[in-house]
Amino acid sequence: MSVYGPEDVRKVTTHRLFEMKERGEKISMLTAYDYTMASIVDQAGIDVILVGDSASNVMAGNVTTLPITLDQMIYHGKSVVRGVKRALVVVDMPFGTYQGNSKEALSSAIRIMKETHADCIKLEGGAEVIESVQRILCAGIPIMGHLGLMPQSINKYGTYNVRAKDEDEARKLINDAKLLEEAGCFALVLEKIPAMLAKKVASELRIPVIGIGAGRYVDGQVLVLHDMLGMTQGFSPRFLRRYADLNTIMSDAVKHYINDVKSLDFPNDEEQY
Ligand code: KIV
C-alpha cells in the first residue's frame, strides 16, 4: 500500500524541498541503486532518492567508493529512474569525474542527466571544486553539495571518523557551505559531523541541509537503504538506526528453500504444469 495522498503524487522538485525547509517539514532521503528497490522506496513516499556512489560498496563489494565508474553510476541511475514516479532522484558524480577540471566535470554531469533522466547530481567538496560547481550550474543542472565526511577523500583522511571536531575544520566547513549556497546549490548533505555544527550550518543556510550522522537539528535525514534495512553486516556506526533485519529474514527464506528442494517438498503438485 502506498502512503501517497491525493496531491502527494506530484513530483518532488528542488523547489518543493526549499518550501519544506521554509515550513519546517523534515525531508526524508534514502539511497537506491536498482529498479525494484527504488520503486518500493518511492511508493512508500520517500521525498528524495539518492543513487549514491555507495553503490561501489553495497552493490559491487568494493572497500571504498573510489572504484565506481561514470558508466556504472549511469547504469544504476537509469535503473532507479525507471522505478520512480514521485521522489526527486539525485545521482552521485563518482570520484575522478569532476575534480580534475570544470570542463570534464560539466561533460560528466551532462552524461548523467542525458543518459539517466535523473533530476540532479551530487558531488563532494567545497572551495576545491567550486569552479566545477559553477560550470555545472551554468548548464542548468541542479547540484546537491556534500561536506563533512567525504568518502571519496578517504585516502586523505585515513579514517571514517567524525569530521570537523576542531575549530579550523569547522570554520572551513561553514565557509564551504556558504560558498556552495552562494554558487546556487539547491541542498547540502552533511556527513558525520558534530550535531551542534550541523545545527549552525542548517540555521545559517536558506537551502535544505540533509544529515547523515549529523544529528537532529538539520532539515532532513539520509541513510543507506541496505544499512537501514539490516541487509548489510559488520557496519554499525552510532548514527545508523536499523528498521528491519532483512539479512536474517532473507537468509532464513533461502535456507527454507534449500531445505524444500533437498527434501523434494518443492515443487508440489500445484506448483508444476
Ligand atoms: O553515496 C552515498 O550513499 C552517500 C550518502 C552517504 C549521503 O553519499
Image (cartoon, rainbow, N blue to C red):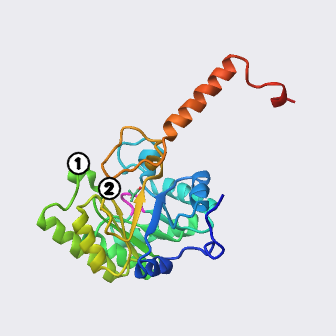
Q: Position of residue 199 (x, y in %)?
A: 27, 71
The mark lying in front, picked from 2 and 1, is 1
Q: Is residue 32 something one can see in this rendering?
A: yes
Q: Which residues are magenta?
A: 93-97
Q: Which residue is mark 1?
A: 159
The residue shown at (36%, 79%) is 134
Counting the numbered discs, the total is 2
Indicate which quadrant contains ligand 1: bottom left
Q: Nearer the viewer, residue 12 or 34?
A: 12
The numbered disc on residue 152 is 2
The quarter of the picture where residue 44 lies is bottom right
Answer yes or no: disc 1 within 8 Å of ligand 1.
no
- Residue 235 located left or right of residue 36: left
Q: Is residue 38 above or below residue 170?
A: above
The quarter of the picture where residue 86 lies is bottom right
The residue shown at (31%, 83%) is 182
| Amino acid type indicated by mark 2 | Gln
| Magenta stretch: dominant secondary structure | loop
Residue at the left extreme, as displayed? 167
Callout 2 secondary element:
helix
